[in-house]
Amino acid sequence: MSLLAGKVAIVTGGARDIGKQVSLKLSGAGASVVINYFGDKAGAEATLAEITQAGGKAIIVQGDMTKQADVNKVVAATTEAFGNQIDILVNVAGGIVARKLLADMDESFWDSVMSLNVKSVFLVTQAVVPHMVNGGSIINFSSQAARDGGGFGATAYSSAKGAVLTFTKGLAKELGPKGIRVNAISPGMINTTFHNTFTKDEVRKNVAAATPLRREGEASEIGDLALYLASNNSSFITGASIEINGGTYFI
């Protein structure tokens, strides 16, 4: 029997890069996957096609996870397609928005970063937990930036990801008695659109060269970790943040 046979999973930001790989890995292990996307419909459709061609079950649902109404729409679509029990939630949706120094930030920018990375996790988790009646696994995405402050101009982003870490630990205590495990994945430099957009090539090369494994990580490696945390193979792990950075940062 497949590792996640009969399980239902929601992956926010599941259309591309890390989210896509998480969606593919969960589906490949037998889960029915709800792929949430915001603007990348083509990416979501391509991920869906890859899953269905491999014999998996999935749907795509557009929505802004910082909006309660859109969150409710995703959860409703999930229960309509796959039933009332939701077993796995992976909160991938988030981002840096832009690199800005303190003097260049305004209130609107700060709020947008916090909303995208923290409010979204709160809203989706709050909406999904009532459907985890037989226990479940929640996987939040933090970042190495939460540990070391991030790169130049990433103070707002690193602060938000630090909040995700704290939220994860608090929820692990609150939801553990219900059989719900809550963990975080904290990636370092991963080969994704994120760094293609916001990180200079020279910086990426320098980071890779200074990494003990002498390379960037790949999104598929993050997907493998998410699969482990989603499955019963990690049944006694909760409240943890797993650092996946090739050895650039230890805790």
Image (cartoon, rainbow, N blue to C red):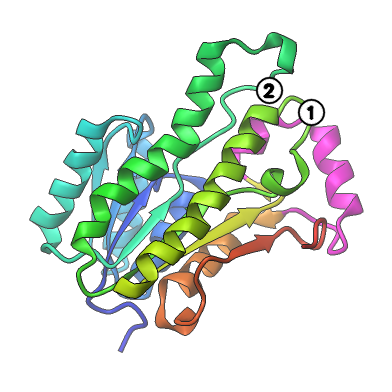
| Quadrant in which the C terminus appears | bottom right
Asked whether the viewer can see residue 42, the reply is yes
Is 133 on the left or on the right of 231, as rendered?
left
The structure residue drawn at horizontal position 14% and vertical position 62%, both measured from the top left corner, is 82
Q: Is residue 215 magenta?
A: yes
The structure residue drawn at horizontal position 11% and vertical position 63%, both measured from the top left corner, is 83
Disc count in the image? 2
Image location (x, y in percent) of residue 110: 56, 20
Identify residue type, mark 2.
Arg
Marking on residue 76: none
Q: Quadrant of residue 173?
A: bottom left
Residue under numbered circle 2: 99
Is 208 on the left or on the right of 68, as rendered?
right
Q: Is residue 190 magenta?
A: no
| Quadrant in which the N terminus appears | bottom left
Magenta residue span: 192-216
SS at badge 1: loop
In the depicted view, which residue is nearer to us: 152 or 198? 152
In the depicted view, which residue is nearer to us: 47 or 163? 163
Image location (x, y in percent) of residue 241: 60, 62
Q: Are marks 2 and 1 in contact (CB under 8 Å)?
A: yes
Q: Quadrant of residue 244?
A: bottom right
Decide: is 76 above or below 51.
Answer: above
Is 249 on the left or on the right of 72, as rendered?
right
SS at badge 2: loop
Residue under numbered circle 1: 152
Identify residue type, mark 1.
Phe
